[in-house]
Image: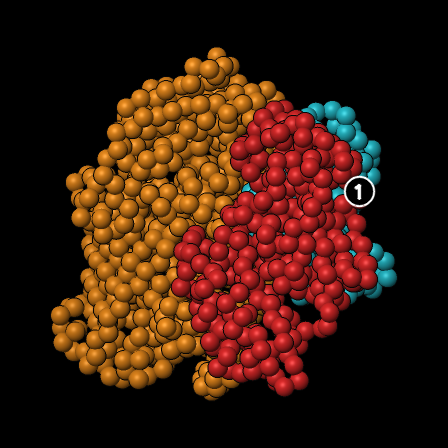
Chain colours: A orange, B cyan, C red
């Protein structure tokens, strides 16, 4: 049993003092001597052929570096999954804000001025802005039918299932896009150094950028180097997008022969970069009159924007969570993600699951009305437990905290009593508000789906230098969630050494192995697990060479010298090994979709002002099973932070599109919660350990995003009697529903 | 030439009078602790104190700061010697990605100076309403500020 | 971020007279007070190459002077300073409340009352209180001084009737002859803080001892290109016994004076529904 001096404790944030004193250097804080500033000229039409690119003759173009698609040495491609997205539009644009021309100049203001002096003539083509228009192929955007990807999940016999049902309940739910709104906009710098393209910046996945640059520049890994700078928030918005902006900076630096910085302002970042996929979900559910689920027929439609990017994986996760955290013997899930002439959508915390779980959870309120049984009772009846079988036929053998989370949240929020109390409150016309309390319970698979982790083949390691310094080596990035601290905690306890002895190496692809992307709630469970294994290998080596694990600094130096001998350092690196019991079939979409699921229950207690229909969440009570809280305070921080983003999506946030572009692309009109918009949070962390996670840990990053939306909508239904099947639940929508 | 006091030191700026205070601080004086998040006065990441009052430095041309006192996050403490407020943020996990933190600290610092031990959940949230955070959901930030306020009240001194 | 500082010409005024002179000599120069609006446009690169007259040194415009009949608020007084002033807090609470809703602390410490008025946004937070307090805008320009009632100063969305080179030097609030039976301000925004309003109400009402309306002043912002007094509702209510029926009828007259629209923040329907509610609540709350 590993020593637990650090895991489970609230160790001070590793890079905390630097961040708190303004010493931490984010990309634009780095003085890059002699750097030029890069800007992007973007499409002003949603779909069209480029007829001409005209440069205003009155401008000193000789001072600038100009890059178009023809300047690309390798392939004009943003490498990710499909091969449909060019780095720079070449002859054809498929969305507003698509990058066409890059310009760099030593003076930032002049660079921006230059961008205004480029005129592009288009021959407009028909455009499709909605899922319906895309399916009707009003515009041909991707292949022949505009479908990036589709899935079919089948379990049991749907027809038989519906035949057994006493009641069938249908509903359609829709959720909008969501902007990540990290406070640090996308920012990248690039320069050539001894034949190596060096890229630094605000990013989540350094090796994704390496892969993209290799294809773009026609180079191998040795001649591309990506280094993450301190990053001011990501939430998925810096998962794949940095590959594009890095490509832009790389091309510009090659053109002008100077380092290049590209730092977006808020307007550009919001208008041009990826968002959460909007979705429409249709639920058709059959139940016995006692509330037992017998059939679920679910249809999921997502809008991927103009290029595929991560749509196939977002849809996958959405599909695999679409039935909710409930057991049903007969299930069919059909899902599609389609192309529209809007900026491509991509990763945002939750990655498809919040969209389908919104529908799955809220639908229980409709079912409750149809059956005359309280939704809590229905959920208790059908909720996942040990031995349950999921929609893909996965048997949940361990670590299922769903019921425990539900009961804790129900108890601590006084849910049952409040349901009755607010029913009484709402009957009194003299009261100035309506009150409601709503509940949701969701699951969230940790790690990459199915064979994803095998495909990633992630590696991580620890190193001990000859002079006794210890390093954790992983490409996982610190983006606020506590990676640096967690890795040091895990390594320290695996080795039984003090936390302070460990340095977490900067994610620099010339120094650390490819641990896979910092996404999918995998950093602790998967990569932390690799770090733990690597640390244990070092432990064995130390015990073999030195007789014991060093306990003092002096001892460590002696041991290091002995272990390293002639070498400058000894490095212990391990690769991901799929647990043998995890079996997944990509072709049939059956089997163990994820090694483990985390679970969350969330109760939203709110009131609605009768005069203005404004919603005020008075309290949130939540219990979340994450296997093990490596750092309890940071885990709570993820839960509260993720819940707040979820509340923002539920009540405030909506990108408004006109002619295929976001027109509220600033923080004035894209409204995220302030300190006065957030309620007090009562958080309970439940620990149902997962045998394959380091110290029992599963995932925590995305789970909190799944639960607020449906809980808020359920609470609004309780308060007003109206089921509003769409987000955000704005005062306007409430007023409309109550007319 | 524009003369102003920054973190207690007399500084002069010889560039364009309409340069923004945030750019003068970050680029001319190499005080990069203050951050730009939006350029609209919404996010508060650029918050500094101007004659003791929190303002958005992205909206102030430096000519309007002439002869005045500016305080940035660099004035609060160092990694070796954190202020009570910074220590509060470390103890209570008030910083995650950290990009909003300098601005948040300046607003909190001004608030604690004004009301010291009387700070409560409501007053802190109001004081920080102009500082957006996307990571924390604010609760740990409020806990951090109140933790510092309590320590200050105990000692009877200013934070 | 897109502003080009080198391209700007900065002219500094240290007195009202100098401000007027500088603007007369530099037509097209932009007056700059707290900058909370101008600098947003500048950051987008929209004002490069312009001349700016920095008014922030005009000391006489930063004063708040109370006389027997009114308070004269210098145009450069900030929203924060207004909230702190004891006479304004006591006698013009709706303005103080409105100033507390402008952005957040950072904006309130810089934004000025004169700048708010001169900017003439349809959603100007201070305008409904200024309208019901019947504020007088003191202007100074190349042709001298004049006083313009608040409702006449606005010409349309972001437009005032100020002539070229004319500036606001003070906002005068006449003391109310007697305290109202009810005074109320409410801003309905997009969120709890830093919100642009969807609708905004200020109301003052005086009642006789028999429960009839002696006088009433009702104003809404964000429901028309400029702030509006509800002339029809006010006329209807004056002299009438205030009861629930009268409140409802007054609310029905709302659309005679306002014309809300659908926009990026809200809908016409919502604005009307909520505005009627606000008005009814205000009036019902005053019923004896």
In the image, residue C39 lies at what x, y percent? 61, 39
Which residue is at a point 72% across and 67% down the rendered structure image?
A: C176
Query: Is residue A17 in sight in this rendering?
Result: no
Which residue is at a point 60% across and 67% down the rendered structure image?
A: C217
Q: Is residue A209 above or below residue C229?
A: above
- Report the front residue among A93 and A549: A93
The N terminus of chain C, quarter of image: top right
| A384 relative position to A626: left or right | left
In the image, residue A475 lies at what x, y percent? 48, 40
**Disc 1: which residue:** C59
Q: Is residue A720 above or below residue C67?
A: below
Task: Report the number of numbered marks.
Answer: 1
| A135 relative position to A307: left or right | left
Which residue is at a point 69% across and 61% down the rendered structure image?
A: C96
Q: Residues within 10 Å of mark 1 (few under 14, many from 20)?
A: some
- Report the front residue among A49 and A236: A49
The C terminus of chain C, quarter of image: bottom right
Q: Is residue A462 above or below residue A566?
A: below
In the image, residue A449 lies at what x, y percent? 33, 52
Which residue is at a point 16% across and 74% down the rendered structure image?
A: A162
Q: Secondary structure at mark 1?
A: helix
């Amino acid at each position: 049993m590993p020593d637990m001096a650090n895991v489970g404790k609230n160790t001070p944030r590793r890079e905390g003092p630097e961040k708190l004193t303004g010493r931490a250097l984010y990309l634009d804080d780095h003085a890059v001597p002699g750097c030029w500033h890069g800007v992007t000229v973007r499409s002003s039409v949603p779909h069209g052929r480029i007829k001409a690119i005209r440069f205003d003759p009155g401008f000193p173009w000789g001072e600038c570096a100009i890059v178009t698609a023809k300047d690309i040495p390798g392939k004009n491609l943003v490498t990710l999954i499909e091969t449909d997205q060019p780095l720079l539009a070449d002859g054809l644009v498929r969305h507003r804000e698509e990058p066409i021309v890059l310009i760099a100049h030593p003076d930032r203001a002049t660079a921006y001025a230059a961008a205004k002096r480029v005129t592009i003539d288009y021959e407009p083509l028909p455009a499709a802005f909605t899922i319906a228009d895309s399916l009707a192929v009003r515009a041909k955007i991707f292949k022949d039918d505009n479908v990036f990807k589709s899935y079919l999940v089948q379990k049991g016999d749907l027809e038989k299932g519906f035949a057994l049902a006493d009641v069938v309940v249908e509903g359609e739910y829709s959720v909008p896009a969501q902007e990540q709104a990290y406070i640090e906009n996308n920012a990248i710098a690039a320069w050539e150094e001894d034949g190596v393209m060096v890229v630094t910046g605000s990013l989540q996945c350094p090796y994704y950028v390496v892969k993209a640059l290799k294809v773009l520049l026609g180079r191998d890994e040795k001649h591309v180097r990506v280094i993450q700078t301190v990053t001011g928030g990501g939430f998925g918005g810096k998962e794949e997008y940095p590959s594009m902006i890095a490509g832009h900076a790389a091309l510009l630096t090659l053109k002008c022969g100077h380092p290049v910085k590209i730092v977006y302002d808020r307007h550009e970042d919001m208008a041009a970069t990826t968002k959460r996929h909007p979705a429409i979900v249709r639920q058709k559910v059959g139940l016995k009159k006692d509330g037992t689920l017998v059939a679920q027929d679910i249809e999921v439609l997502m809008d991927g924007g103009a290029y595929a990017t991560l749509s196939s994986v977002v849809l996958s996760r959405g599909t695999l969570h679409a039935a909710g955290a409930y057991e049903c013997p007969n299930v069919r899930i059909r899902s599609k993600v389609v192309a529209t002439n809007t900026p491509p959508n991509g990763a945002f915390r939750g990655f498809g699951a919040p969209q389908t779980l919104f529908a799955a959870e809220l639908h229980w309120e409709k079912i409750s009305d149809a059956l005359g049984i309280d939704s809590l009772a229905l959920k208790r009846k059908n909720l996942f437990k040990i031995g349950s079988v999921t929609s893909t036929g996965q048997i949940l053998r361990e670590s299922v905290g769903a019921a425990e989370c539900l009961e804790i949240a129900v108890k601590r929020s006084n849910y049952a009593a409040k349901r009755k109390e607010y029913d009484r409150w709402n009957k009194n016309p003299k009261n100035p508000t309506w009150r409601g309390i709503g509940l949701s319970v969701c699951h969230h698979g940790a790690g990459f789906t199915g064979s994803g982790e095998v495909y990633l083949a992630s590696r991580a390691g620890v190193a001990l230098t000859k002079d006794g310094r210890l390093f954790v080596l992983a490409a996982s990035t610190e983006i606020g969630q506590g990676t640096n601290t967690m890795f040091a905690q895990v390594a320290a306890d695996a080795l039984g050494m003090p936390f302070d002895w460990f340095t977490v190496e900067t994610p620099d692809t010339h120094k650390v192995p490819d641990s896979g992307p910092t996404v999918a709630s995998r950093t602790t469970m998967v990569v932390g697990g690799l770090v733990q294994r690597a640390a244990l290998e070092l432990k064995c080596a130390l015990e073999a060479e030195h007789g014991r694990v060093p306990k003092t600094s002096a001892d460590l130096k002696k041991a290091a010298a002995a272990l390293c001998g002639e070498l400058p350092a000894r490095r212990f690196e391990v690769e991901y090994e799929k647990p043998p019991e995890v079996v997944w079939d990509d072709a049939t979409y059956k089997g163990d979709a994820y090694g483990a699921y985390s679970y969350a229950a969330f109760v939203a207690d709110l009131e609605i002002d009768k005069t203005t229909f404004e919603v005020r969440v008075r309290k949130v009570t939540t219990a979340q099973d994450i296997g093990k809280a490596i750092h309890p305070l940071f885990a709570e921080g993820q839960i509260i932070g993720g819940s707040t983003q979820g509340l923002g999506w539920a009540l405030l946030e909506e990108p408004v599109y006109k002619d295929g572009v976001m027109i509220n692309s600033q923080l004035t009109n894209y409204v995220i919660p302030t300190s006065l918009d957030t309620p007090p949070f009562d958080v309970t962390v439940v620990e149902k350990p997962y045998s394959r996670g380091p110290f029992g840990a599963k995932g925590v990053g995305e789970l909190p995003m799944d639960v607020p939306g449906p809980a808020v909508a359920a609470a609004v239904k309780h308060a007003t009697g109206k089921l509003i099947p769409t987000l955000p639940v704005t005062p306007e929508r409430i007023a409309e529903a109550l007319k | 030439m524009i003369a102003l006091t920054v973190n207690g030191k007399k500084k002069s700026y010889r560039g364009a009078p309409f340069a923004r205070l945030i750019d003068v601080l970050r680029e001319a004086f190499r005080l990069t602790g203050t951050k730009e998040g939006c350029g609209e006065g919404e996010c508060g990441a650029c918050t500094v104190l101007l004659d003791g009052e929190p303002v958005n430095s992205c909206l102030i041309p430096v000519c309007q700061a002439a002869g005045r006192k500016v305080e940035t996050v660099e004035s609060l403490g160092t990694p070796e010697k954190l202020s009570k407020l910074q220590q509060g943020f470390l103890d209570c996990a008030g910083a995650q990605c950290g990009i909003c933190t300098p601005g948040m600290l300046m607003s909190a610092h001004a608030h604690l100076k004004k009301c010291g031990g009387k700070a409560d959940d409501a007053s802190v949230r109001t004081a920080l309403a102009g500082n957006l955070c996307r990571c924390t959901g604010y609760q740990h930030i409020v806990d951090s500020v109140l933790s510092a306020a309590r320590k200050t009240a105990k000692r009877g001194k200013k934070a | 971020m897109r502003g080009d500082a080198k391209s700007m010409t900065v002219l500094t005024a240290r007195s009202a007279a100098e401000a007027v002179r500088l603007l007369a000599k530099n037509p097209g120069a932009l007056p700059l007070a707290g900058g909370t609006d101008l600098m947003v446009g500048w950051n987008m690169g929209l004002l490069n190459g312009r001349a700016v007259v920095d008014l922030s040194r005009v000391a006489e415009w930063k004063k708040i002077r109370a006389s027997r009949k009114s308070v004269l608020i210098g145009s450069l007084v900030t929203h924060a300073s207004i909230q702190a002033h004891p006479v304004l807090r006591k006698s013009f609470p709706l303005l103080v409340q409105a100033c507390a809703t402008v952005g957040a602390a950072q904006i309130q410490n810089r934004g000025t009352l004169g700048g708010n008025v001169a900017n003439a946004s349809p959603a100007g937070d201070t305008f409904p209180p200024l309208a019901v307090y019947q504020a007088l805008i003191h202007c100074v320009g190349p042709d001298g001084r004049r006083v313009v009632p608040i409702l006449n100063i606005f010409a349309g969305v972001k437009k005032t009737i100020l002539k070229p080179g004319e500036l606001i030097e003070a906002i005068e609030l006449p003391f109310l002859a007697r305290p109202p039976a009810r005074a109320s301000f409410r801003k309905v925004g997009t969120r709890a803080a830093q919100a642009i309003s969807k609708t905004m109400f200020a109301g003052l009402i005086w009642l006789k001892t028999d429960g009839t309306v002696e006088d009433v002043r009702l104003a809404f912002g964000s429901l028309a290109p400029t702030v509006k007094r509800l002339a029809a509702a006010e006329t209807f209510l004056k002299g009438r016994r205030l009861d629930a029926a009268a409140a409802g009828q007054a609310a029905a007259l709302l659309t005679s004076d306002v014309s809300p629209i659908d926009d990026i923040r809200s809908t016409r329907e919502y604005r009307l529904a909520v505005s009627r509610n606000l008005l009814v609540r205000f009036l019902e709350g005053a019923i004896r």
